[in-house]
Amino acid sequence: MAWIVWGVGVFAYSVTVMQRTALGVAGLEAADHFRTTPGVVSTLVVVQLFSYAFAQVPIGVLLDRYGSRIMLTAGSLVVAASQVLLGVADDLPLAYLARILLGIGDACMFSSVLRLLPRWFAPARVPVLQQVTGVFAAMGQIASVVLVLPLINGLGWQPGLLIAASLSVIGAAAAAAWVRNAPYGEEVNVVDEPFSKIPRAVASVTRHPATQLGFWVHFTSGFSTNAFLFMWGMPYLIVGQGMTQLEASAYFTLLSVAMAGSGPILGALTARHPLRRSNLALIMIGALIAAWAMVLAWPGRAPTIALVALVLLIAVNGPTTGIGFDFTRTNLPHARLGAANGVVNMGGFIGGTTLVLLMGFFLDQIAGGQAYTADHLRLAWLLQIPFFVVGIAGLLLSRRSLRRRMAAEGIIVPSWREVVERIRSKRAGGDA
């Protein structure tokens, strides 16, 4: 039953991810449909991501109160309605409303699935299953490339989106029928307190250093990936690197497959080395910075191997955001995980949304109403630099606070020098 409950939740979530990323892969088609520029289309993505990010905490509070079953069902129905509205919209105001609804519905999904895991599975399995949940998000991204984009190109804007929306209705029905908040006979474990006390509880959760560290891990590893997936990745590959749409779609498919493959590996490493989770995140973030530096510094079109490396590291940093949720899971009570995970989940989406908005504004300014060039896009991606600086600083500061709190509770994270000395001592003892 545990696998059925989780599997249905993952299906509903992956369909939502397909709806979420559809506008990113069909950004040029959206610009044609609404008779505007890709820069204006990027504001649709910005509205969607802002509504998603700022709905996280209110949705998390509702999740702690009502449980995953209701939230997965309601979220899927709202997502379906949003795609129907986008399909029938012929002007931008309705499109903006559709993306606001999508962001709100989307906010119900991931945290709802995560909240099920500690109730249905043994603790040792949870870190890996968190990442496998993200793997199915990658399947949703692939579906947006291989299903939604061909539907829009083959049948037209409205029929393509209406067919896609029907899958979210199926997800809602499945969640209502099969998802249960806890195994039969066990306490459901939801919050039942006056709404007047909720703001204080949310503030307490937000102040916890584990929540803050989770937020900064999610922010720093997620903003670049989200900006690439949701808006500027496809234009960069097509315009900035001179690819055809088919070639760019192949890179997006590679990204999704790599994201799916790396998730369980990162989950296993997180479970095996719980005191080194933040170091694992920093290694992945550092590798992504190096890949972007190499590609953006390359004159003209970057070599294929450099572009493949960039796409693979963008992919790996997708599941790296999931490490942020492990800090809340192991440091906060289960009844508060909805709100705590909502705060964490805001990180990469606030960062990604802000970057998408800045890049769109910057590109429209330097292009002067003309088509974007490769040099324009190269300069736009350099706007990531302050995001990485702020994110890494926040990560290191919040990690220091959490480690001080852990030390007060008797949990000491040994330094790397101590770890090396311990390994040497064990080897010396073995040789003796």
Image (cartoon, helix red, strand yellow):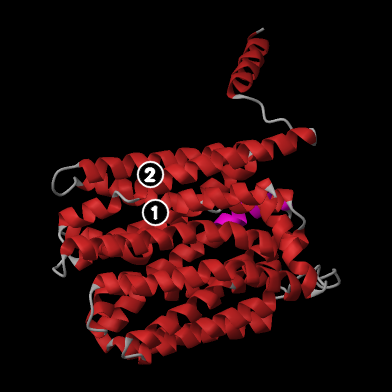
Q: Nearer the viewer, mark 1 or mark 2?
A: 1
Horizontally, residue 377 falls left or right of residue 128, namely left
Dominant secondary structure of the residues highlighted in magenta in the image: helix
- Three-letter amino acid code at the position of disc 1: Ser
Which quadrant would the N terminus be assigned to in this image?
Answer: bottom right
State the separation of the CA atoms marked 1 and 2: 9 Å
x, y percent for residue 70: 68, 80
Residue type at mark 2 is Leu
Q: 398 above or below 180?
A: above
Q: Quick check: 11 left or right of 309?
A: right
Residue at the image point whose x is 26% and y is 40% from the top: 294
Residue 174's place in the image compared with 48, above or below, is: below
Q: Residue tagged by mark 2? A: 288
Classify residue 68 by image quadrant.
bottom right
Residue 117 appearing in the image: no
Q: Which segment did they paint magenta?
A: 123-131
Secondary structure of the residue carrying numbered label 1: helix
Residue 2 x %, y %: 70, 67
Give the vertical position of 285 relative to 418 (above or below).
Answer: below
Is residue 386 visible in this depiction of the protein? Answer: yes
Name the residue that disc number 1 marks.
Answer: 224
Which residue is rendered at x = 31% and y = 82% of the image? 151
Query: Going by the picture, which residue comes out furthest to the top?
Result: 432
Q: Residues within 10 Å of mark 1 (few under 14, many from 20)?
A: many
